Amino acid sequence: MRRPLIAGNWKMNLNLAQMRALVAGIRAGCDPFGSVEIAVCPPTVYLFPIAEVIADSPIRLGAQDLYYEAQGAFTGEVSAAMVAETGARYAIIGHSERRHTIGHHEDDRMINLKVKAALAAGLTPILCVGETLEEREAGQAAEVLTFQISAALSGVKLASPERLVVAYEPVWAIGTGHNATPEQAQQAHAHLRSRLHAGVGKVAEEVRILYGGSVKPDNAGPIMTQRDVDGGLIGGASLKVDSFLAIIQATAENAAG
Ligand code: PEP
């Protein structure tokens, strides 16, 4: 039985007062949905203050990225151990905004190093994979997912299923308002689970695979009923208490058994 996870990726939004208010609202409203694990991923500089606000609450903390080197002359970077010291449990790795945007262009080798660094520091990676629109239209979606997941997990041994979360985030659905249909999501998730199985073995059955890409309160329910969908990575809709809680509620009501 995989416990659903709803993680909010705040990206580079809000200020400290707004983040505190957002978390306070989530905290005040999340009690009835204890079947769903909740995480918030603020920008790195806000990890410590948000850790204080969620102390003694069921809300978990995640970083949006980390660097793979342990220490040294890497101006501007933050190591996995530094992220772990803030109390974070999760770290998003390989988000499409880091794979595809100018100035980042993270490749699969770097993502593999980041996954390994996160695991070594005791963090659970939320590993993002997903095809672009061109790749989908060329019929290459499954092939791209196979490559990305195998490359990211190359040489990774998974001690237990809690140590990894995968997020299927079709690039064409992120922040665009065009989400994958529940059937498209299920097909991609089932494919990812079978590839995970090939890579890390039986433990793949218990690893959570989140869907991400324009999840909103009105489309969350049908996506969450899919057999291999174990929650969501939420961007825009995680920035408001009402919409984030509504997605959590829809997940609690519809999560696949
Ligand atoms: C994301 O950035 O991971 C994401 C899914 O964003 P949005 O929900 O805004 O599409």
Image (cartoon, grey):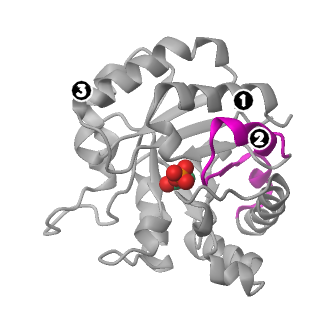
The residue indicated by pointer 2 is 224
- Circle 1 Cα neighbour tier, 10 Å, few/some/many (<14 / 14–19 / ≥20): many
Q: Which residues are magenta?
A: 200-226
Say if mark 2 contacts mark 1, CB within 8 Å.
yes
Judge whether residue 185 is colored magenta: no
- In this rendering, position of residue 164 left or right of residue 84: right
- Residue 186 percent location from the top left of the image: 82, 56
- Figure quadrant of residue 138: bottom right
Q: CA distance from mark 3 to mark 1?
A: 28 Å
| Residue 126 visible to the viewer | no
96 over 220 or under it: above or below: below
Name the residue beneath numbered marker 1. 250
Amino acid at dot 2? Met
Q: Earlier in the sequence, mark 2 or mark 3?
A: 3
Quarter holding the N terminus?
Answer: top right
Mark sitting earlier along the chain (3/1): 3
Q: Residue 203's spot in the image, x, y percent?
A: 75, 51
Q: Is residue 49 visible?
A: yes
**Mark number, residue 17:** 3
61 or 171: nearer the viewer? 171
Q: Residue at x 41, y 14 (%)?
A: 56
Answer with the quarter of the image where residue 199 lies. bottom right
Please name the amino acid that badge 3 sits on: Ala
User: x, y (%) of residue 102?
Assistant: 34, 78
Amino acid bearing label 1: Ala
